[in-house]
Image (tube, coloured by chain):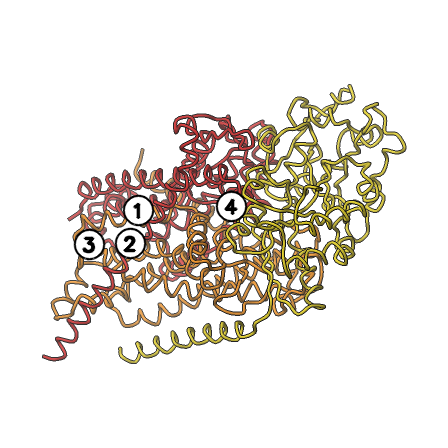
Amino acid sequence: MKKRIVYIFLTLCFFVSVLASCSKTAESAVRPSIRISGAWALYPMMVVWADEYMKIHDIDIEVTGGGAGKGISDVFSNQSDIGMVSRPLKQEELEQGAFYVAVAKDTVIAIINENNPVYEDIMDKGLSREDLRRIFLGEVSHWGELFNINIEDDEIVVYGRADSSGAASVWASYLGGYTEADLQNNSDSNVSGDQPMANSVQGDANAIGFSNMNYVYNAETGGYIESIRPIPIDLNGNDVLDNDERFYDNRDVFLKNVTEGIYPSPPTREEYLVGNGPFEGHVKDFVKWILEGGQNFLEPNGYVGLVENEREKELEYLINGSRHAD
Amino acid sequence: MNKYIKESIFRVLMIISVFIVVAFLVIIIGVNIVKGGIVLINEPAVIFTAPGPKYLLGGEGGILHAILGSILMVIPSTCIACAASYLIALFLQVDYIKNRFSNKLRVVFDVLWGIPSIIYGIFILNILIAANKRGSLGAGIITLALLQMPVIVRYMDEALNSVPDGIRESAYSLGATRLETAFTTAKYALPGIIAGVLIGMGRAMGDAASVIFTSGAGNSMPKGLSKSVSSLPVLIFQQANSYYPSVREHAFAASFVLIIIIIALNAISRICSKHFQKYTAGSDR
Amino acid sequence: MKQQKARSNLDKTIKYIMVIIILAVFIFFAALFIMLLQRSQLILSRYPVWELLFSSEWDPDKGLYGFLPAVTGTFFVTVFSLMIAVPISILSAVYISEYMPSAVKSYFQAFIDVLAGVPSVVFGLCALLVLVPFTRDVMGPLFGVNTTGMCVFTAALVLAAMVFPVIISLTVESLSILPIGLREQFLSLGATKWQLIETVLFRAAGPGIISGIILGFGRAFGETMAVVMVIGNKNILIPSVFSPGQTLPGLIVGSFSEMMSVPEHQSALIFVSLILFIIVLFFNILANIIKNKLKSRWRYE
C-alpha cells in the first residue's frame, strides 16, 4: 500500500518538474514580442509573414487562430496586439475604438457542378446579379426556368454557410444588401466552412453555392478543381457573356480581373489587421513591413495582394493612425 | 402468442441491435483507419515532424505539435479530474451523506455534463481576461479537467452504486475505515470506473471548441505551461478546411492518430484493471 | 492503538478534502450560472423574453433574435435520436450481459468503451463521408423525398451512435450486478429467458437503465460538433425529418468566435447557453424525481 503511494507521488513529481522546467526555459529570453490572433482565413498567411519577419528581425511573434470576433475582442481585452479580421468591421466594433488596416484581398465566386443540367447555357450566357439573387433567395426552383427550357430533374439545391463567415456576408451584400441570415434561411442546406461547401457542390449535379476563389481554382496549376466550376457573371445584364466578361478560364486571368476591379466588389473583399487604437512601436513596424515587403508573399501562397494605390492609401492610414484623410 | 416464439423473436431483435451497434463502430473506425492509414503509409514522417511555417499552405511539416499538445493537455487533466472525481463519487455514496442530499448533488453533475464544451471555454476565457493572462497549456489543462469531471463523476458514481452491499458490510465488519472500505469497493467497481475515465478522456481528447478559447491553439510546438499549444481536434478543423488536397488528407491521418491513442489508452487501462481485479472478491463474476 | 488513530485521522482528513472539492464544484456551478445570467443581461434588457423565445425570425444583423426554431430543433433531434438509441442499446445490452459467453463479453465491452471514447469530431467526419450520402441516395428516394442528406434524420442517427455506448455500458453494469438467485428462482418456475428479462430483470435494473437514458440525453442534448456538421443549420421550424434544422449548441458554435466582439450578438449567444443550462437543469430534476419513484416501486428484495 505504502509503496504504491510512493510510486504515485514520484510520477506526479516527475510530471510537475517536467512541466515546470519547460516553462522556465521558455521564459528566460526577454525579447520584444507581438501577439496575433483572429480569423482562420488569414491565419496560414500570417504564419508565413511572421516567419519571414522573424528571419530579419530579432522579435518573437506568436500567431493563434480563433475567428474574427475573437481577434477583435482579444485586442480590446489586451490579450493580443493585432487581430486578424476577414469580414467588414461592424459599427459596434468601430465604436469601441477599433483601428484597421487592409492588408490583403479575397474574393467570393458562385460555384456549380460541371454536370449541371444547364451547364452549357450558364457558361455561354452567364448569370446576372438578379438571376443569382433569385436563386439564392429561393425564388427560382428549377435550373430550366432561368433559360426558359423544360428539362427533367433540375431542381436547384442551394447551399449556404452555417457559421458566421466573411464569405457569406460579402456574398449577401453583393446580391443586394441582404444579411447572412437571409442566405442561411433560404438555402436548402448549410455547411460550416469553404471546404465542406466545395465538397457538397462536387457531390450534387444540381447544387449551387459560393466560396473563396481558392476552392475553385487550383493554386498551383491555375485550373479548375475537380468538378467545381465558377459561374460567370453577366455584368451588364444583356443575357450574353461578352468578350470582356469572359475571364473565368484560369486563375491568373481571373485574378487580373479581380485586382483591376472588373470583377465587382463586393464580392471582392478586403482582409484587415485590427488594433485597439492606432498601431504603435514594433507592432506598427511589422504591419508596415506587411504592406511593403510582405505583399510579395501573398500571391505565391494563394492570396490576392492590394493594388498599388490602395496599398499606398493603407500605408498612409497606418502612419497617420487614422482612417480619415485629414 | 407462444412464449417460445416470443423468446426467439426478441432474440433475433437483440442480435440485430448488437449488429447495428457493431456496424457503427466498424464504419467509424474503418473509415479512419483506411483513409488515415493510406496517408501514414505513404508519408510516415508526418507524425514525427513539427509543422513548417507553410504547413497549412501545402508546405512541408507534420502534426507532431498537435499530437504532443493533445497528450500534454489530456493526460494531466485526466489525472486531476480522476483524483477529484473519485473523491466526489465516494462522497456521493451512502457512507458519507444521506441519499436525499446525494441525489440533489448528482443533478449538478448531470447538468454540467449537458452543457456544451464551448461554454466552459468562454467561462475560463473570462477568468483569463480578468487575470490578464493569455491562453496557455495550463489553462487548457484546467478547462479539460473541468470538462471531463462531470462525466467521470457520474460514471464512477453509478459503478460504485452497483457494488453489492455485502462487500461494503464485510469490510466494515473487519474494522476498516470508510476510506479503506472505499479501496475495496473501488476494485469491485473497476470496470465501470475505467469506462467512465475513458469516456471522460474521450470527451477531453476530442474537444476543439473549449481548447480554441483557452489554450491559444497556435501552430508552434508546446514550449511550456504558460505558452500556447494546439491539439489534434483543432488541427483537424484547420486541415479539413484547407484548399490544398494534401493538407486535407492529413486531417484523416490526424484523426487516425487520435483514434489510435484512444484505443491504446483503452487497452492499457483494460490490462491494468485485469491486474488489480485478480485480488478482489468480485474477480470471478 | 496509535495506528488506529492514524487511520481514523486519515479518514477524516480525506473527508474534509472531499467536502472542499464538492464546495469548489458548487462554486464553479454557481459562477457559471451567474456568468451566463450577467452576460445575457444586455439582450434581455433590449428585447422581452417572450419575444426571444417564441419568435421564429433569426437575423442578428437586423436585430431579430428568435430562438424558437433552435429550441424546438434541439428537442426534436434529441428525442428522435433517443427513440432510435434506447431500444437498440437496451436490447444489445441485454444480449451482451445475458446471452453472450463471458469470454466474448469482456472483449465486447472493451469495444463499446472504444466507441464511447471516439471524439465527436471523428463522428462528424465519418457522418459526412458515409451517413450524408446514405441519407441522400438511399433513405431520401426510399421515402420519396428530395433531400441534401444534411438533415435532422442524419443528425439523429449520428447522435444515436454517440448515445449507444453510454446507455449500453450502464445497462450492462446494472444487469450484471443482479444476484444469480433472482434469475434461478424465476427460471426454475419454467419461464423462458425473455420472460425473466421482461418481468424481473428490467425492473430490478430499472434505476440503472434510467440513469443511462438520462446521461444519454445529456450527451445528445449538449452535443455540438458532430451535429453542426450534418444538420444543415437552417433556422426554420422543422417541417419533416428530411429537412435541415437548427440546434441551440449549433447557434453558439457557428458564430460565437466570429461575433464575440459585437456586444448584442454575443449577449444573444450567451442567452442561448442560459436557455440550454435551464432546460438541462429542469429535465434532470424531473428525471430524478421519476427515477426515485420507480426505484421505490421496483424494489426486488
Residue C254 visible within the image? no
Which mark's residue is nearer the viewer, 3 or 1? 1
Which of the two residues, C126 or C286, is positioned nearer the viewer here? C286
Residue at image x 43%, y 76%? A17
Percent coordinates x, y for residue A251 in the rendering: 81, 46
Q: Chain of mark 1?
A: C
| Colour chain B appears in | orange
Q: Which residue lies under the disc numbered 1? A: C211
Q: Are tags 2 and 3 found on a single chain? A: no
Which mark's residue is nearer the viewer, 2 or 4? 4
SS under mark 3: helix
Q: Which residue lies under the disc numbered 4? A: C226
User: Mark 4 belongs to which amino acid?
Assistant: Ala
User: Mark 1 belongs to which amino acid?
Assistant: Ser
Percent coordinates x, y for residue B38 in the rendering: 65, 60
Which mark's residue is nearer the viewer, 4 or 1? 4
Query: How many C-alpha atoms fall within 10 Å of the one at disc 2: few (<14), some, or many (≥20)?
Result: many
Q: CA distance from mark 4 to mark 1?
A: 23 Å
Which of the two residues, C219 or A43, is positioned nearer the viewer here? A43
Q: Which residue lies under the disc numbered 3? A: C181
